[in-house]
Amino acid sequence: TYQDLENSGALKYRQLVEAAAPFAFGQRPQQVQIGDTLWLCVDSSPYWMGWVAQSAESECHCVVALRGQDGSVYDSCNHPASPVHAFINGSSENDVPDLPLELLRSLSERVTKVRDNGGQGSITLAGFSQGGLAALACALWMGGGGGKNGG
């Protein structure tokens, strides 16, 4: 239910996902203030944005926000989570689409450094619609060791 979603705390990332929605980079903010937290953009592609909120060396929280499909033919062909992406582009259904894996590896190293020094850190994947499918693919990659040991 919506109440369950609200109770989960996931809605606090809504602004970060919405910031990634405009396809044109010039329309995307480079920082977003949510409550007492200032989020800075550290990476941006047509389909995602990487955000970091870091206080000194003791705390580092990261969010990879993946936008949903905008309904255009271009997005149907190119969005990494489009169900027809492989078919339209003539690639194998087993090919891994372009996902923010290097960004996740970089954020993982950043959070690991903070944790190794006794601090707190996290990486959250947030997506809407097809962005949620891409977020799931990234989570599977990370869960398989992709964010650690170069896997």
Image: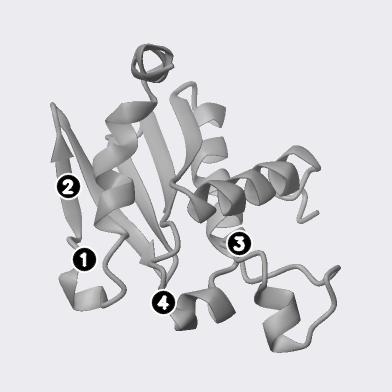
* Percent position of residue 137, x then y: 68, 50
- Quarter occupied by residue 27: bottom left
Give the Cα distance between marks 4 and 3. 14 Å
* Label 1 sits on residue: 28
- Is residue 8 at least partly visible in the picture? yes
| 3 up-or-down from 10: above or below | above
Instruction: State left or right for residue 108 relative to residue 33.
Output: right
Give the Cα distance between marks 1 and 4. 19 Å
Which-is-in-front pick, marks 1 and 4?
Answer: 4
Q: Amino acid at mark 2?
A: Val
Residue at 32% across / 59% down in the picture? 20
Earlier in the chain: of badge 4 and badge 3, it is 4
Q: Residues within 10 Å of mark 3 (few under 14, many from 20)?
A: many
* Label 2 sits on residue: 32
Give the Cα distance between marks 4 and 2. 27 Å
* Label 3 sits on residue: 81
Earlier in the chain: of badge 4 and badge 2, it is 2
* Label 4 sits on residue: 72
- Out of 110 and 68, give the one closest to the viewer: 68
Which-is-in-front pick, marks 1 and 3?
Answer: 3
Give the Cα distance between marks 2 and 3. 25 Å
Please tell me whether mark 3 sits on a helix, a strand or a loop.
Answer: loop
